[in-house]
Structures are given as C-alpha cells and as structure tokens.
Image (cartoon, rainbow, N blue to C red):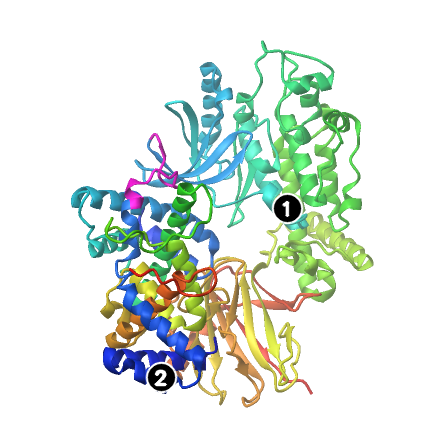
Amino acid sequence: MDPERWRRIERIYYEALERGADGQAAFIDEACGADEELRHEVTTLISAHERAGGFIAMPAMELEARAIATSNIPAPGATTIGHYELLSLLGQGGMGEVYLARDTRLKRNVALKLLPAAYTLDSDRVRRFEQEALAASALNHPNILTVYEIGRSEDAYFIATEFVDGETLRRRLERGPLGAREVVEIAIQIAGALAAAHKAGIIHRDIKPENIMTRRDEIVKVVDFGLAKLMLPDAEAGGGDLSGLAGGRTAPGVILGTLNYMSPEQARGSDLDQRSDLFCLGIVLYELIAGRSPFTGDTPADAIAAILEKQPPPLARENSGMPPELDRIVTKLLVKDRECRYQRAEVLLGDLQRVRRRLEFAQEFTTTRRYGAAEGRSGDRTDGFGPAWAWPRTNKVWLYTAAACLLFIAIFFLAGRPIILRPADPQPPPAPPAPVELIRYFLETKSPDGVKGEVNGLEPLAAGMDLKLHFTARRRGFLYIVAPNEKDALRAFLTARPTRSWGVASNEVIAGVDYVFPAGDDNWIGLTTGALPTRFTIVFSPTPLSSPSFLAAPARRQLTPAEQEEWEAFQRRLDRASQEAIAGSPGVKVTTTAGQTVVFDITIKKSG
Amino acid sequence: MTELSSHEVTQLLLAWSDGDQLALEKLTPLVYAELHKIAKRHMRRAGENHTLQATALVNEAYLRLIDAGSVRWQNRAHFFAVAAQLMRWILVDFARRRKKLKRGGAALKVPLEEATGVTRERDTDLVALDEALTNLAKIDSRKSRIVELRFFGGLSVEETAEALKISPRTVMREWGLAQAWLYRELNRTEKGGVAEDGS
C-alpha cells in the first residue's frame, strides 16, 4: 500500500473513533466520498477495533508461559545428561551425536559427545579408551582438544570436552582448496599435536578432516585421540566388514577407520604405530592442497587398492601454486613403506617450519615489489581472504625468478652470514614478522545517473560520484571512521553499521561480515560539493577505544580544536597499516605487522 | 542466574544485533532453557488457576538473561529493541514447534478466539500473528515496532514511548490501530473478506 494512502486511512480512522457512535457514519461518508475502497478499509478497521478487545493486551510471554512450563516438547535445553544440560546439536557422525552442553557444576559450556551404545558394551575397552583419551588430554597441548570427563549417565556413555567455536577441516574443504600458507599453518599445528602425543606413546589412529577443527582465531585442535581404538571390532567377532576386502585376514588383522583416510598398514590389518598417523596426515594435507582425496575408488576394494599400490598424482599438477618443498613433504608422508616415510612428527614439524619461514620471507620480498603481479589470480578464491595466504598462481616466469633470487638470498643469510660475521651463532637471524591481513575494503559508487559500481579506492575516481565504504574485517575488532565534513576542515566522528543489521550503530565488527558506511540504502557520501581529495581516517582496534574521548561517545559533530589536536597526537602514536589493491577484485587489502591498534587512510582522489 | 552468565548472553545478543546469525543459534537454546525454568517457577507460585503475573515474569526474564547495565548498550532503547526482537523470535519459534507437534505438522489456521465463554484462555496464534506483524511493518514500521515492544517485549506504554522517542499518547493511538489492523488481518477468510464471527 502506498504510504500516502495509508496515512489517509489512518487519519480518517482516528477521527471517526473520536466522533463516537453518533457522528461516525456521517463523518466516514463525508471523508471517503465515492472512494468505496477507502470506506471499506476504514470501516473494517473500526469493526476490527470493536471486536479485537485488546486481544494482544497480554504479553506474548505470559500467553506462552503455561505452554512453556508444561511442555514436553524436546526443546533445546530441556534435556540433561548427568550434570550437563544439552543446549543444541552440534553435529552427528559415526561416533555419535555431539551437543553443545552446559556443565551445571562448573558453569561452563562443553561439547558433549554421546557414544553409540554398540561401542560401549565392553567396559574394559571403555576403560582403556578412557585412559588413552585422558592421557592425550593431560599433555595440555594447545592443539589437542581437552577432555574434561568421560562418564556414564544411565544408559549412555559420554565424553565432555572443551567446546571449540569453529569448524572442522571437512567443512572448510567444502569451500575449496586452501592456499599454501594456510595449509602450512594448519599442518604445523597438527604435527605439533602428533609430536606431543607420540612422545607420550599415544597414537591417534583416525586422522581425517572431520577430526581436525580450526577455531576462528586459527588455532587448530585435533580431536578424538584414542577414540578410534574404541571402535575396533572385537577380535573374537572375526573382524569388521571390511577385513574381507583387504585379503580376508581376521584378528589381529582387522580394519578400522574411515576408508579414505587409511594407511597401507591399516588397510592390511597390521598393527598401527605413530607413522600410520603421519600417513593419514599426508592424505589430509594432500586434500587441503588439491581439493580432493589422493586415493579414490568406485568401490571400497578399489579405494583400498589405491592406498596400497597407487601413487597419487603429483601435487604440482593439482595446484600449481604450491611451493615445491610442500609437495616433497606430502610425498614423503605418503610413502607406502612406513620404513621409508617420515619416522617422527618432530622431523616433519621442523620441515614445515622451514617452509613457513621461506613463505614469510617470500611475502616480505614480494611486498617490496609490485604487489599486483604477485597476487595473480588469487582474488577468485571464495573464502574472501585467499590472497593473504595464497601462493601466486600465475606469472610463473616471474615466480621462478623470484624463487631463484630468494634461494640465493636465503643461502646468503642462512649460510653465509654466520660464517662471515659470527661463526659461533647457530641461530639464523629471526625472520621479519610477516604482514597479517587486518581488513579489506572497497568503495561502492553511484554515478549521477544512478549507475552503481565498485572500485578499490586506490584509483582516482570520476568526479560527481556518490560513495559508500564497505569493510570486511579479518578478525573481530572495533572500527572507527573519522571523516572530513563538507568544508574538509574540521572532522566529524562517525560509526559504521553492518548492512544486515537492524540494530543501533556500533563500532564492533565481526570477522567476515560486510560493514557499510554510511548505512541505509539512501545514504551516500556525496562528493559533488566537497573539496577533493577527501580523506577518511580509519582506526581498527582489537579493543574498544576510550580515548581520544570523542571516540568513546560517537557524535556527528565537528571536533573542537583541542579534540583535533588530541586526535592528531593519537594518530602519531599508532602504527600505520599498509594497503594494496587486490588484483581481479575491487577490494583493497589492509595489512599490518604490528597486530595492535592501527590506522590507515582512505583518500578519494579525483581523476582528470 | 545460575546456569550462564548474563554477560555471556549480552555478548551473544550484541553479536546478533550486529548481524551474526550464529549468535542467534547459540542464544536460542540458552534463553529458551531459562524461560522454561522461570515459567515453571511462576506456574508453581501462581497456582494452576491463576493467571501469571505478566510483568513480573517479563522482568525476571530480562533481569536473568540480559546484562542490562552493561556499558555496551548504547541506551535503553537499544537494549529493549534487541530484547523484544529476541523474545519475538524465541516465542514464535516455540509456538511454531508446539503447533507442529499438536497438529501433526498440518498448517491449520487457528481461530483467535475459540468458542467464547467455554474457556477464558485464549489461544492466540503467535505464528500467524508474527507473519501479520511482518506485513504490518511493510506499510507502517513504527506501528509494527510498537507491537513488538509491547506484545513481545512486555513493555508498558510509557516504556514504549521512551524507547521510540514518541509521546505516550501516540503510542496509545497507534497501538490501538495496530491491534485493529492485526485482528482484521488474522480474521480474514480465504476469500479475502473479513469473517463475521458474531462474537
């Protein structure tokens, strides 16, 4: 309904009610005239008013309270297991259901896994599993999921663990393969977890993307240590369904684990050791890089045959952007004969750390060169943060030249320098901190004739454009925008609002959400009247800022000279983030090596 | 609050108001569980045959769930807007599930007043009301917000006026029209006319 008409209905309705029963009909006749539709609207509303009788006068909560109190609906939160209150279902798998639950004694949220009854009939076995799971947890390793309790309530065994706010690698993989740096970061953390566990004599036995979680802050957690052992079929029962496929061997030649994430020794039904975990990690890393599993088959038998005999296609062919060292590491993890594989997770860890250093070094190197070329086509990645991690995928000649230069520089620094300068120093010089992506932004533009576009903001802009700024932060933080007023003299403080939000403006931004300034479809920054160039100063902070004082109490007003001075001094104390355009995308990437509160400018230049 | 800190809920609520849908997923079961407990306790206290003290119930829920004194709320209006929106979401969700269970999933329209006089308890169809309210928002968003704050948020006329920065008189007037509009909308027959139930 058009607003004008609705206002008219409203006016007549109010006035008709005020007249009371006597003059009402005559007034409506007069007000509506020949407009029958209008009359119908008004009279039906008045009739509804008479019959409604305050039908929503009682708050909804009260109406529903009785139903809520007496309800037997399996509502989330209504069920408890022991002293855990189940809040919501997080996931379901072969190993049972996992709930987000509340520990009512310790008042903390946990992940509660309910084990399928079939695996918990043998209490000795449960006890052995419990020992191993708790032992792994007791290692107190940051990359091993902490187990709080393994318990039993009535008929169900459960495992209460720390709750990880993140996603499994399986979920992550659904968005496509990962960049080199991301793979290396994840691999280092898994290798660290395995090194600690293996040292304590604990084997995971079921390393696969489902059992590795990445938290929002990029901490990786390996989950379910020892759980696979619980699922080992009874020797007496003649092995699992799959044993026949691997040559019909029975106890102790039984197979467990997920078919695609098996080591050759596992497929043969031999005993597993720490090197089996390393093979499975190799499969996971291959999949992260290539986006698909190295060993596949149409039938379980084919898949097992592939694990036992087939060499997976070289990674370089699957993902040309991968550094060759990473390819070599994965190949060495996937060696069929475990005697020739990586023998220890610590050795793998060392190799991975070397790759990381080299990647960081390469990034430093490219930062000083033309970034656009180094970014290549990585802007087409779907996670929105690809280029921060991605190895350049195109411009191979340039890449090889750069790699050769790097190698030379690396040799000079790592080998040459200690000999020349300080022969006794066994440590290579620390690599400079790698730039970390903070935020990205782009400008949404609207031309005088209403045509919308997106630009990266580093390029000059045609005159007469209207603007909006779009920000997507890499991590949670607080975003402050200080912008010039029309005269480009004093500044006004403004806040951003997320595009999808209906709430009141806030400076807090959540990772991965698009925040737009100014909010609202009709609000644009008009540059037609303002003097160009125009500068927006952006402050991004991990914590809310209370000074300069005007940052804490957002106000659209001009700053006083004293505030202006405070603002200038504040900016001088901050680190300046660097920015570069993202090739193939309208975005600009803002990076920092400082990691604390940083500041950067978005300057609008006029073309021509 | 015994089970979870109001601070935690406030954090989630703020995240949700900033557009984080995951926060709502975490929030719903927490708030629902708390409402369940509060409602149960009030039922016991009030006895089966008495109406619950609505204001007490609503206030207790807010006090227990939400850290209203948190400095991060920009003002009372912000707090109430978010809280009322959350209550709407949770109560309608509950009603939807209850309805589904009761009617075996069939989407039947429930008359607002069932056989007047037989029972004093009215079976307001929150699910349909929620839909109607969404439609009202399209033609008149302020009236829809008044209903949200008053009906779902449990606010008084004065509190609603304060939250929306309008006079209590305007709240009264618009609340009346919004009720009439919703009532008409909910009692429309399939043919588009208004049912004359004669009650």
- Residue A130, horizontal then vertical, whole percent: 45, 23
Asked whether B93 or A203 is in front, the reply is B93
Q: Chain ID for label 2?
A: A
Q: Chain ID for label 1?
A: A
Numbered badge on residue A29? 2
Is A576 positioned to the left or the right of B35 in the image?
right
Asked whether the viewer can see residue A180, the reply is yes
Q: Which residues are magenta?
A: A67-82
| B29 up-or-down from A249: above or below | below
Asked whether B116 or B21 is in front, the reply is B116
Question: Which kind of residue does numbered mark 2 sit on?
Answer: Asp
Asked whether the viewer can see residue A547, the reply is no
Quickly name the residue at label 1. A174
**Is A437 covered by the magenta stretch?**
no
| A290 up-or-down from A546: above or below | above
**Is A69 covered by the magenta stretch?**
yes
Q: Dot 1 surroundings within 10 Å: few (below 14), some, or many (20 or more)?
A: few
**Displayed quadrant of residue B174:** bottom left
Question: At x 61% / y 87%, what residue is drawn?
Answer: A464
- Residue B59, horizontal then vertical, whole percent: 23, 56
Element assignment for label 1: loop
Is A21 positioned to the left or the right of A366 in the image?
left
| A153 up-or-down from A570: above or below | above
Q: Dot 2 surroundings within 10 Å: few (below 14), some, or many (20 or more)?
A: few
| B53 up-or-down from A530: above or below | above
- Residue A475, horizontal then vertical, whole percent: 51, 57
Question: Which kind of residue does numbered mark 1 sit on?
Answer: Glu
